[in-house]
Image (tube, rainbow, N blue to C red):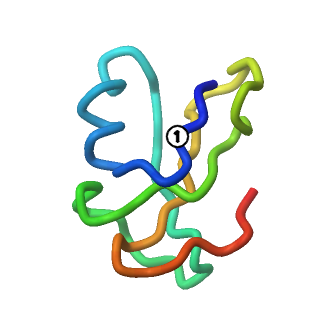
């Protein structure tokens, strides 16, 4: 799994969606829907960066572009 932290979720979706089953989750804990990934940035992922992908979907924990990332899994 590459380190995608800080990257735009919309760009990640465009670049990897054909190769990877992925989902986006709100990292704030508020459960907000991620309807437009381009308005969100990646704060973390499961699996973590540099770990082998063994389960799908890959989960990207995201925050709105204007918000700071919190400590995420």
Question: In this rendering, would 31 be left or right of 35?
Answer: right
The one nearer the camera, 2 or 60, is 2
- Above or below 51: residue 31: below
The residue under the point 73% across, 39% down is: 48
Q: Could you say whether the residue bearing mark 1 is in a helix, strand or loop?
A: loop
User: For the image shown, how many numbered marks are present on the structure?
Assistant: 1
Question: In this rendering, would 5 be left or right of 21?
Answer: right
- Above or below 52: residue 9: below
The residue under the point 24% across, 32% down is: 14
- Above or below 35: residue 17: above
Q: Quadrant of residue 18?
A: top left
Question: In this rendering, would 50 be left or right of 18?
Answer: right
Q: Residue 32, position in %: x, y? A: 43, 77
Looking at the rendered image, the quarter that the C terminus falls into is bottom right
Question: In this rendering, would 56 be left or right of 68?
Answer: right
Looking at the rendered image, the quarter that the N terminus falls into is top right
Q: Residue 61, position in %: x, y? A: 56, 57
Q: Residue 12, position in %: x, y? A: 35, 37
The residue under the point 69% across, 25% down is: 55
Instruction: Write down the residue under mark 1.
Output: 4
Disc 1 crowd, CA 10 A, few/some/many (<14, 14-19, 20+): some
The one nearer the camera, 37 or 70, is 70
The residue under the point 62% across, 52% down is: 44
């Amino acid at each position: 799994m590459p380190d995608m932290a800080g990257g735009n979720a919309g760009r990640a979706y465009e670049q990897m969606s054909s190769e990877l089953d992925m989902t986006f989750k709100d990292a704030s804990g508020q459960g907000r829907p991620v309807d437009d990934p381009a308005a969100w940035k990646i704060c973390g992922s499961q699996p973590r960066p540099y770990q082998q992908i063994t389960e799908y979907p890959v989960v990207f924990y995201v925050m709105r572009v204007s918000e700071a990332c919190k400590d995420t899994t």
